[in-house]
């Protein structure tokens, strides 16, 4: 004689069954959290990229300023030594090699 019972077949009771709406709610919540996390990571990357771009710009600006200062020091030495023709040639060479600096002061 075989008795059929819920225990024999391991049929879950109604209390232990998760409804589809609850699954959807949990999934949506986790999805929103995941999207939010990705957005924050992207913003962090954007900020880091902006900072890195500023640092590179500062390095390039510093290098240009150093070159400019070296030229001006050389130019001052030429003028102090009364080497006017060489000073004029140095200005011409500098203007040809750095046209963006022409007229900047």
Image (tube, rainbow, N blue to C red):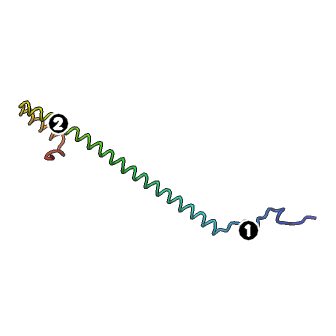
Which image quadrant: the N terminus?
bottom right
Horizontal side of 43 relative to 105 (left or right) equals right
Circle 1 sits on which residue? 15
- x%, y% of residue 28? 57, 64
Residue drawn at (83%, 63%) of the image: 7
Horizontal side of 13 relative to 57 (left or right) equals right
Circle 2 sits on which residue? 71
Where 71 sits versus 15, above or below? above
Count neighbours of disc 2 (C-alpha within 10 A) and say few if under 14, some if 14 to 19, many if 20 or more: some
Count neighbours of disc 1 (C-alpha within 10 A) and say few if under 14, some if 14 to 19, many if 20 or more: few
Q: Which badge, 2 or 1, is on the more N-terminal residue?
A: 1
- x%, y% of residue 9? 82, 62
Q: Residue 27 — which label?
A: none
Given the current orientation, which residue lies at the most extreme top position? Answer: 81
- x%, y% of residue 12? 76, 65
Marks 2 and 1, how far apart in space?
Answer: 84 Å
Residue drawn at (13%, 47%) of the image: 103
Question: Is label 2 in contact with label 1 (beta carbons under 8 Å)?
Answer: no
| Secondary structure type for disc 1 | helix
């Amino acid at each position: 004689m075989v008795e059929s019972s819920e225990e024999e077949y391991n049929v879950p009771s109604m209390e232990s069954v998760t409804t589809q709406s609850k699954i959807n709610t949990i999934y949506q919540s986790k999805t929103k959290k995941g999207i939010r996390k990705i957005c924050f990571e992207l913003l962090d990357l954007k900020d880091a990229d902006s900072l890195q771009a500023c640092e590179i710009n500062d390095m390039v600006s510093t290098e240009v300023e150093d070159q400019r200062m070296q030229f001006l020091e050389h130019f001052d030495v030429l003028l102090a030594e009364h080497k006017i023709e060489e000073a004029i040639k140095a200005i011409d060479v500098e203007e040809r090699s750095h046209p963006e600096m022409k007229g900047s002061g």
